[in-house]
Image (spheres, rainbow, N blue to C red):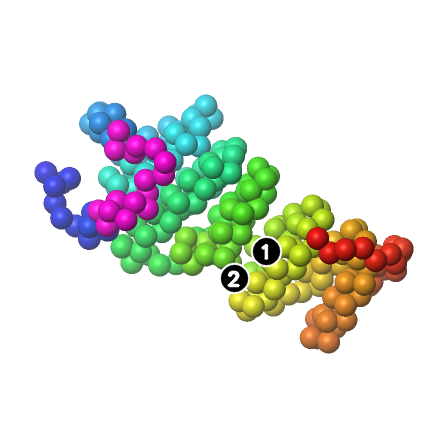
Amino acid sequence: MLGQQTTPLLGLLRKLEAQNIWRMSYNILGQQQQYSAAAAVAPAAEPAAEWIDNPSVSAQEAVKILVHQIQQSGPIKQRHLQVLYRRCQTPDDLDKALKLTRLNYLARGELQQHKPFSHKTSQILIHQALNVGAPEVAQKALKHASEFGLSHDSYKEFHPLMIYYSKQGHLQQMFEVFEFMRGHGRRPGPETCYILVKGCVDHGRPDLAELTIREFEQNGVRVRDGTKLYLDQNPRSVGCCT
């Protein structure tokens, strides 16, 4: 039988199982009999198509379906990941979805498909993480993007997280994301400067905003007139960086 043949992909999946990468706090194996019965009467691609078209299927249920599909048929399409991310409603949902992303990327690698997922896939994950109040998941995805096959070679992947911390008044975390972005070769632009300056001004640190503008100009990055105007139009009180 096909399921008993030793192939590189099955070998990889066995390693993943042994390393406990895709066991995500519930018993995947307990679902296999149910899915095997469904596979006997329907094409392998149908279970994924069914959950995508059925909004009543929760993110955790979708993860179980997709893990099974990767086991049986190999890597899934990016569209499935994107729909899964949007369906996540809690940080735990997204953490499981991120682990599934890792599993799917490893399965792609076994088929010599090493190209990262699209920027759209990365951006959907990050935006949904921030929507459900899980900045730690967004940070994990950015800091370990190469492990998950996620794109992070543009400053645009980092801006939503910087804006999130800015709105929360967490200036230290905002600058930490900026430093990580810059330290990994992502050249900041005028929009990056505006995000940092606005965050500092909005939370009582125009002194930090001035230093930021000065640093950007010294590094040859254009600072928009609107960014300087935003600083000039706000009172110059000095608070504490949180």
Residue 226: x, y in percent? 81, 59
The magenta stretch spans residue 17: yes
* Residue to which mark 1 is pinned: 158
Looking at the image, is mark 1 or mark 2 earlier in the sequence?
2
Image point (29%, 42%), residue name = 70
Between 9 and 120, which is closer to the camera in this rendering?
9
Q: Is residue 109 above or below residue 33?
A: below
Magenta range is 13-30
Residue 180 seen in the current view: yes
Q: Residues within 10 Å of mark 1 (few under 14, many from 20)?
A: many
- The kind of secondary structure element at disc 1 is loop
User: Which residue type does callout 1 highlight?
Assistant: Phe
Image point (72%, 70%), residue name = 216
Q: Is residue 230 above or below residue 44?
A: below
Image point (28%, 29%), residue name = 31
The magenta stretch spans residue 121: no
- Where, quadrant-wise, is the N terminus in this rendering? top left
Q: Which dot, 1 or 2, sits closer to the camera?
A: 1
- The kind of secondary structure element at disc 2 is loop
Question: In the figure, is residue 95 to the left or right of 42?
Answer: right
Cα–Cα span, label 1 and label 2: 10 Å
Residue 33: x, y in percent? 22, 27
Residue 38 seen in the current view: no
Between 187 and 39, which is closer to the camera in this rendering?
187
Residue 120: x, y in percent? 51, 49
Question: In the figure, is residue 17 to the left or right of 203?
Answer: left
Question: In the figure, is residue 115 to the left or right of 143?
Answer: left
Q: Residues within 10 Å of mark 2 (few under 14, many from 20)?
A: some
* Residue to which mark 2 is pinned: 153
Residue 212: x, y in percent? 74, 66
